[in-house]
């Protein structure tokens, strides 16, 4: 979008907060200060059950080789693939003929 200079100068100050004001990014139910208190209250008002905690992986961790680096849960191997054959050139005897 191309704007004339006058229109740009009219719009630009609409995005600048006056001195002494603080920009608020999150507010309401998802605000950090209230989230732990408000989310369970909202679930109760909506008659929704609380989410189930993740399954206990303590027995799986002992035999798991791979662990997720983000959450620490064991990664279970559900399928493996055979290694593909390497591409080879033709045998030397065929190349010299």
Image (spheres, rainbow, N blue to C red):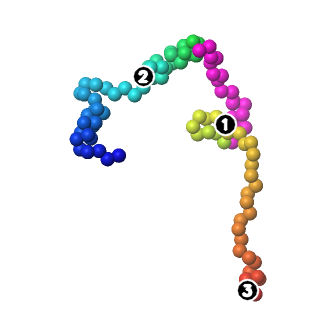
Question: Alpha-carbon distance for marks 2 and 3?
Answer: 77 Å
- Sequence-wise, the earlier of marks 2 and 3 is 2
Foreground label between 1 and 2: 2
Q: Quadrant of the rendered structure where residue 89 is?
A: bottom right
Which span of residues is magenta-colored?
46-65
Residue at left offset 37%, top offset 26%: 24
Spot occupied by residue 9 in the image (x, y as percentages of width and height): 24, 39
Question: Alpha-carbon distance for marks 1 and 2?
Answer: 35 Å
Spot occupied by residue 65 in the image (x, y as percentages of width and height): 69, 42
Question: Alpha-carbon distance for marks 3 and 1?
Answer: 54 Å
Spot occupied by residue 53 in the image (x, y as percentages of width and height): 64, 23
- Give the residue at mark 1: 74
| Picture disc at residue 96 | 3
**49 inside magenta stretch:** yes
Figure check: 1 above or below 95: above
- Give the residue at mark 2: 27
Q: Quadrant of the rendered structure where residue 73 is?
A: top right
Element under disc 1: strand
């Amino acid at each position: 979008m191309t704007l004339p200079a006058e229109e740009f100068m009219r719009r630009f100050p609409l995005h600048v907060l006056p001195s002494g004001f603080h920009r608020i990014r999150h507010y309401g139910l998802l605000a950090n200060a209230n989230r732990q208190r408000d989310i369970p209250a909202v679930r109760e008002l909506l008659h929704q059950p609380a989410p189930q905690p993740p399954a206990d992986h303590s027995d799986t961790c002992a035999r798991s080789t791979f662990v997720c680096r983000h959450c620490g849960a064991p990664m279970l191997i559900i399928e493996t693939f055979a290694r593909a054959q390497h591409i080879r050139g033709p045998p030397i005897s065929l190349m010299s003929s």
